[in-house]
Image (tube, rainbow, N blue to C red):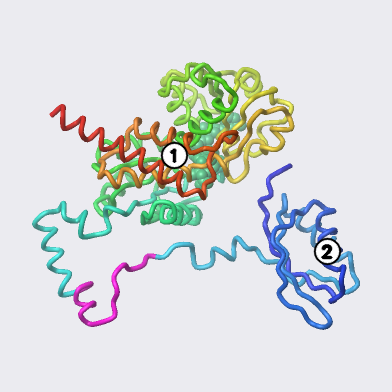
């Protein structure tokens, strides 16, 4: 079954007679539409209006659904089609809000002038005080240049804003962090680095998001060296953490020793290469990869991974296959080997639908909606901000992956993303390592 990414609400009017709703739902099901919510909007003596949410595989299927309802005739009509997802985005998804009451003039003078001046002076005297008297220590910049927005490609940072707002909403919901989207209109590494460095003092951390490869590697590396706040490219390390957690769970469930498993990575861009690096550093001995670009293959080799010649060869060779190419449907069911673990992580559409992979013989299969970096980045930043860490280390990322794997229920690959305990566990694990590393540094000085 293909992914059902076209979600619409159909406003359907029927004569107020028993049986008509049944006719409509049967007509939708007959052409493959999947029904979500049904709400009755209006009941009159003559007609009833209902809002029926339908999930379709494509716009073509949606058209078929509408035609099937209208073919019922006898007073049954589709009055309107509303796009719930677009509708939900009107005005954006985030809003900066105040934490102090402003009810009296006294409040106003505290929040703003003249009272605020004394806080400014305290920071002049001791810049460290900015951590306590401003929101900086709890605010993360979410920076993109728009060059790899999900798997949609280089669509520009303005078109990527809904994704950045989404990440900010997740930061707030799962970790109580204020995320501020920053849209860059350059993808030149020097310009990006310089711009980010110039704004960095207003933030407790920098989340780089949907920045394409290979320029993302240099940008992250240099920012990590040149800034003294945590910097993390989510598509690299957030994804690698969650993928490591998923394969730890898969191997635990299947009774396989992960370090001796044969792992194959399709697509060695930002996400794929970081997954391979994480696996190799974790001690997985056989990590193979393929990519269309030679430069990406060379990078994998430089980290100790091995390259294969084709997709077919990789599918034949590997026990665990991970794909991050942005190419929907790249893995065909006939390529799947019995008992394989398939993680097709591209968004918005995976390389193979998990249900199809399972039907073709996979023992576990998942897509990028479930194995998603939302399980990592909020807790990772909560942990480093709590510890006032200056960087995000490999040890912290491994601790985050292990915390996710530990919170995963037996028989499953990954926890439910809405389970707050996962994000809390990640935050705690990262904070503990950050504090330990600070102690180690103190002891060596
Ligand atoms: N589930 C998650 O949490 C998650 C996180 C990050 C990225 N992703 C998804 O992964 C995909 C890639 O993201 P990215 O940031 O790594 O992008 P990227 O552009 O850096 O990397 C994509 C890589 O795939 C390679 N590729 C493309 N077609 C290929 C093919 N047919 N065979 C082999 N290699 C091929 C490209 O050459 C490139 O190296 C996107 O769809 C994104 O949504 C998912
Ligand atoms: O945004 C997501 O859903 C995950 C990831 O960051 C991606 O780029 O696909
Ligand atoms: Mg992303």
Q: Residue at x 62, y 17 (%)?
A: 317
**Spatial distance from mark 1 to mark 2, Cα to Cα?**
44 Å
| Residue at x 42% of width, y 48% of height | 144
Magenta stretch containing residue 106, yes or no? yes
52 vs 68, nearest the viewer = 52
What percent of the width, then of the height, locates residue 310? 62, 21
Disc 1 to disc 2: CB gap under 8 Å: no
- Which residue matches tag 2? 24
Circle 2 — which element? helix
Q: Position of residue 315 (x, y in %)?
A: 64, 22
Queried on whether the Cβ of the residue with tag 2 lies below 8 angstroms from ligand 2, the answer reads no
**Horizontal side, residue 1 vs residue 417: left or right:** right
Lower sequence index among marks 1 and 2: 2
User: Residue 299's image quarter?
Assistant: top left
Q: Give the image location of residue 126, x and y in percent.
A: 11, 54
Depth order, front residue of 296/126: 126
* Residue furthest front in the image: 410
Number of the label disc, if any, that sits on residue 238 = 1
Q: Is residue 101 magenta?
A: yes
Q: Where does the magenta region start and end?
A: 96-112
How crowded is the residue under tag 2: few (<14 C-alpha within 10 Å), some, or many (20+)?
many
Above or below 259: residue 37: below
Question: Is there any visible trace of residue 338 in the rendered image?
Answer: yes
Q: Is residue 154 visible?
A: no
Left-right relation of 267 to 27: left
């Amino acid at each position: 079954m293909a992914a059902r990414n076209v979600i619409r609400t159909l406003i359907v009017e029927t004569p107020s007679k028993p049986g008509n709703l049944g006719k409509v739902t049967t007509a939708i099901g007959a052409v493959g539409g999947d029904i979500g919510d049904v709400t009755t909007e209006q009941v009159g003596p003559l007609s009833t209006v209902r809002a029926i949410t339908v999930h379709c595989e494509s716009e073509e299927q949606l058209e078929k659904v509408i035609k099937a309802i209208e073919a019922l005739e006898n007073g049954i009509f589709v009055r309107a089609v509303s796009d719930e997802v677009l509708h939900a985005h009107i005005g954006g998804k985030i809003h900066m809000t105040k934490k102090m009451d402003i009810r009296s003039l006294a409040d106003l003078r505290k929040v703003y002038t003249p009272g605020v001046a004394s806080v400014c002076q305290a920071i002049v005297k001791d810049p460290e005080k900015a951590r306590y008297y401003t929101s900086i220590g709890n605010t993360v910049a979410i920076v993109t240049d728009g060059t790899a927005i999900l798997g949609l490609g280089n669509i520009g940072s303005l078109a990527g804003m809904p994704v950045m707002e989404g990440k900010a909403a997740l930061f707030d919901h799962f970790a109580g962090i204020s995320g501020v989207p920053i849209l860059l209109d350059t993808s030149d590494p020097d310009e990006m680095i310089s711009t980010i460095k110039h704004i960095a003092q207003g933030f407790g951390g920098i989340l780089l998001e949907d920045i394409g490869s290979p320029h993302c590697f240099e940008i992250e590396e240099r920012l990590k060296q040149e800034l003294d706040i945590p910097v993390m490219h989510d598509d690299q390390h957030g994804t690698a953490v969650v993928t490591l957690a998923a394969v730890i769970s898969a191997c635990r469930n299947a009774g396989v020793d992960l370090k001796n498993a044969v792992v194959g990575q399709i697509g060695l861009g930002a996400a794929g290469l970081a997954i391979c690096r994480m696996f190799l550093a974790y001690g997985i001995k056989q990590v193979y990869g393929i990519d269309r670009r030679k430069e990406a293959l060379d990078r994998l080799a430089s980290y100790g991974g091995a390259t294969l010649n084709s997709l077919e060869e990789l599918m034949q060779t590997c026990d665990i296959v991970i794909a991050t190419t942005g190419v929907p449907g790249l893995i065909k069911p006939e390529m799947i080997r019995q008992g394989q673990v398939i993680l097709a992580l591209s968004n918005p559409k995976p390389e193979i639908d998990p249900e199809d992979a399972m039907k073709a013989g996979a023992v576990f299969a998942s897509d990028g909606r479930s194995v998603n970096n939302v399980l990592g980045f909020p807790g990772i930043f909560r942990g480093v901000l709590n510890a006032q860490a200056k960087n995000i280390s490999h040890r912290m990322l491994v601790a985050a992956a292990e915390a996710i794997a530990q919170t995963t229920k037996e028989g499953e690959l990954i926890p439910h993303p809405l389970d707050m305990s996962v994000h809390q566990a990640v935050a705690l694990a990262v904070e503990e390592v950050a504090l330990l590393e600070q102690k180690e540094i103190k002891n060596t000085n």
